[in-house]
Image (spheres, coloured by chain):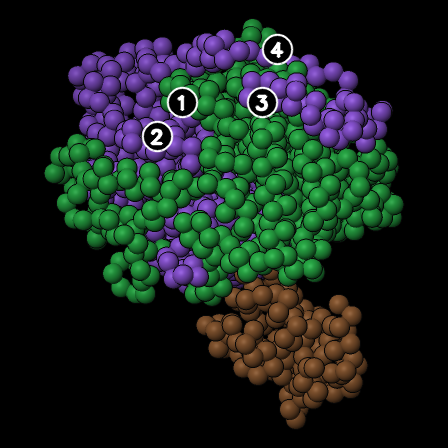
Amino acid sequence: MGVTGERLQPTLFERSRPGRGAGKVPHPPADALSRIPGDQLRDLPPALPELNEPELVRHYVNLSQLNFAVDTGFYPLGSCTMKFNPKLNEWAARLPGFAQAHPLAPDEAVQGTLQLLWELQEILAEISGMTAVSLQPAAGAQGELTGILMIRAYHASRGDSERVEVLVPDSAHGTNPATASMAGYRTVSIPSAPDGGVDVDAFSAALGPHTAAVMITNPSTLGLFERRIGELLDAVHAAGALAYMDGANLNAILGRFKAGEAGFDVMHINTHKTFSTPHGGGGPGAGPVGVGERLAPFLPAPRVVRESDGSFRLERTGERPTSIGRLRSFVGNTGVLVRAYAYLRAHGAEGLREVTDDAVLAANYLKHRLTEDGAYDVPFDRHCMHEFVASAAGLKRRTGVRTLDVAKRLIDHGFHPPTIYFPLTVEEAMLIEPTETESLETLDAFAAALIAIAAEAASDPDVIHEAPHTAPVKRLDEATAARQPNLRWRGMTGRQMPCPD
Amino acid sequence: MVPPELRYTKDHEWVRLDGDRATIGITAYAADQLGDIVFVELPEIGRSLEQFATFGVVESVKAVSDLFAPVAGEVVETNGTLASEPEKVNSDPYGEGWMLRVTVADEAQLGELLDATAYDALIAAG
Amino acid sequence: MPYGPHTPADREKMLTALGIASVDELFDDIPEALKAGSLDLPPPEPELELATRLAALADRNRTDLASFLGAGVYRHWTPPVVDQILLRGEWYTAYTPYQPEVSQGTLQSIYEYESLLAELTGLDVVSASHYDGAAATAEAALMTCRATRRQRVLVSKAVHPQYRETLRTYFGGGLELDEIPLVADGDKAGTTDIAALERLLAEDARPVAGVVLAQPSFLGLLEPMADATRLAHAAGALFVAVVEPVSLAVLAPPAAYGADIAAGEGQPLGIAPQYGGPFLGILACTDALVRQIPGRLVGMTTDVEGKRAFVMTLRAREQDIRRDRAASNICTNQALLALAASVYLAAVGPHGLRDVAALGAARAAELEAALATAGAPRLHRGAYLNEFVVRVPGARAAHRQLLERGVLGGLVLEDVMPDEPGLRDGLLVCATEVTTTDEIRRFADALPGLTGVAPGAEPAAVGGGV
């Protein structure tokens, strides 16, 4: 099964006993804090748990075994690109020279890191077809905000204050409209065309002097390449607006399509999707952005610069006054970027092309297996890219079993469910992305599991409604969790739920 | 069949006139669509609402929905019990799940809303 | 391709099933004119060569310096148990816990992290993490605007310059950010000017949503947090404390002085400096503000069989549901770093954490005395924990010469706070539990040639420690 353990654990606080632990830090002199004024000191020490190392280790090892992970099984999460996380990259990031470098150290003391970051800027610029890259954003969403803020700065620099809207397709990831709002823009959602692509005519009609930007994911969140993207980009620029590409689906187009060359003004990259940096249970990631000439002056500062003597340095404060400033501290999630760099140097151009070719081939193969079987609806009768949408709408009508139930039953088959109920434009959606690092046996087993569940839905739907049966916990009471939130451990008082073990 | 004595908006709010006050909530259909409701954001007492303008938000575990005023008026009372028991909107949407009361500026506005038959037809059409 | 499983036979099988001759046909939707031409990248390297080159790059970074550089990122001893746990694939290759039944490890560890930080800050609601201290501070400031429906935030000049820069970027559209000046001289020099804060709060035409101070401040000084909180609340504003988590083992936490929100950088909790990230944005608030806090929250609940379980909750605040009405666009966070911080805290324990803070204070006092004797006295007189500013004439040149002698003498303040004439000639230095007496001696010995004071001579001016 995809989850290897089942031993639920008490919390650290329940394992704590006074007097356990210690031995990690020497004792300070007794008067170490006597020079601190009393009113600045804590009255009571924090009630942190006391555990000895063996207990601590068991706690975290057993907890880890309750997790599904790429290292334990198949994770066909559409839009997340759950590819293998290479172990060399973990080794590289932990090299002391990289790990111990202080971000405010003088440039001459960190030439290795600066060279790596500079090379990465160049590599990502080439892949995206852009002029310049900033490695600063800490995640894709922060990359999106960076892009939209640069677009805002661009319009401001031209004295254009009329542009108050950002257009997105209705299939857009939630971060897109949320980003537009953070930047002070109103989001206009444009319904998609029947073939699943953006409705270029609807976009053109909505474009005008009030449009600051459009945000397009290409391939779309349905896994389909936007065939009329050239037309759309022309219309956007004709209206005086700029085009942002959400690069979440870059795994589908490496070496096949370069956003900047095609006419996008800015694009973000999710290193934790396309370039294998691990998801870590929800983060960290990195969201570098690439820009064309128009937006290059506005990139966040500091970027890494190479001098004529071959040395590297950070841009100095005030060196590029047109920059939008910084979105976070220091230069970026360097530890994540070291991993991305190692991945990119391991692959080279031919490796990346193979990544895309295999990812797209695997997705189409899986789509074909499901289409052939017919139990699930697979809208859009055309080749997909690296992911595709299937729907349990028909299954629900016939048997009452919904996408949520299918997802939970997949867990019993040892698979992590795909992305469900996204994009919002398809009823009972399942967005499936196998990636290029899954074997044919895995793909076949996954297809077989989905098909078996559909058959089971006809004969024994209750088993599916009550799935998962083999996970460490069953379906959860999410309503109570939201109505009466218990967001932190509270000592021995208050309501407690039974402690496992 | 929804309660026949109420009037309805196409956004699934209901309204009941009690003298010069109108009580407002959301229908069972809306509550079902949302799923388990976990939070209701209501306006402050004294706020003036315009007909069909948003006056609050209802959140479920997995969704969020704006609330639209069926009639214009001033907010005179809100259902304080929903803060600790939002599930009442699911279990008794027309009774204990009421959301707010307003003074009615113009009774004629109620006539513009759907009656029970029309609302039933609306949700049957899907 | 180094990690792909497909053999030519596998590809053939898939192509045959699809009834196509070549994978190129799957890319026919790309308009001919927009197909990429070349992809011009360094050639791929087998693992041995790549590893050798990566090691050589890492070796070009200096790891031999006696470092006294803090300024928001601190050297600490991280027990090896932290990294060994983090290296389990079940932790670092897991995804966001959207399917809670198979993510109880991640979910419980986040709940524990929230609980640990709630203990440290005294605030009951802790987000599952934000990007870093700077972004967390910016989000905290935005929270105050949303919660009070006011547009203006006051931030002390003694908050980290990069955090203030980040705030400016986030505040770009329609919100106002004003800086609170620092006291220029006397015993309170370098701390936030409370009288100035009071004046800024008194502008009726521009009501304040939030007041932001750091404790300890960027300059290492202990700030009048209780006074600032009181003034903020009296003006109807919320108070944001920017905190350093190790110091919370010994210093009065935000809840003690009534702060509404705490933000800060969790890097000192078992996370290596890594040249800037990934780090850990701490964001915590009172119960009253729970609906305003951005980012994920994990709560405790039960499953259908009554077993205790953990789940992401209050999700309807987040971007995937609220979309353009979400408080923040944050999706990916810093979950693995929150785990690192939790394991670190559990490994050192409350007494250990207290010892880390106190040892840092003791070493810092040692450092202060050694530097003063060597001709570099403290610039300020206020209390500090383990970081402070010393005056070295020609600080920038001195810093360079120290570097040549193998000492990273802190941070040249003129580089990051050029508008504060009082800080010219200032070096911001710190000590922690890993700072050794030997390193302090190296620093002190390297100074006299730079300050013009003979080794062991009485310095020209002495800064007090209290």
User: SS of the residue at dot 1?
Assistant: loop
Check if mark 1's residue and mark 3's residue have beta carbons within 8 Å: no
| Residue designated by label 1 | A94
Residue plotted at (36% across, 37% down) = C340
Instruction: Report the Cα–Cα distance between label 2 and label 3.
Output: 28 Å
Q: Is residue C446 visible?
A: yes
- Chain letter of the residue carrying label 1: A
Q: Nearer the viewer, residue C70 or C98?
A: C98
- Image position, residue C203 (x, y; %): 51, 58
Type of residue at label 2?
Asp
User: SS of the residue at dot 4?
Assistant: loop
Check if mark 3's residue and mark 4's residue have beta carbons within 8 Å: no
* Both marks 2 and 3 on one chain: yes
User: SS of the residue at dot 2?
Assistant: helix
Type of residue at label 4?
Pro
Q: Is residue C363 left or right of residue C273?
A: left
Mark 2 / mark 3, whichever is N-terminal: 3
| Residue designated by label 2 | C83
- Chain letter of the residue carrying label 4: C
Mark 2 / mark 4, whichever is N-terminal: 4
Chain A takes which shade in the image? green
Chain C takes which shade in the image? purple
| Residue designated by label 3 | C4
Instruction: Report the Cα–Cα distance between label 3 and label 4.
Output: 17 Å
Count of numbered labels shown in the rendering: 4
Q: Is residue A274 left or right of residue A240?
A: left
- Image position, residue C72 (x, y; %): 39, 34
* Both marks 2 and 4 on one chain: yes
- Chain letter of the residue carrying label 3: C
Q: Residue furthest top?
A: A309
Residue plotted at (66% across, 18% down) = C8
Q: Tell me which chain appears brown.
A: B
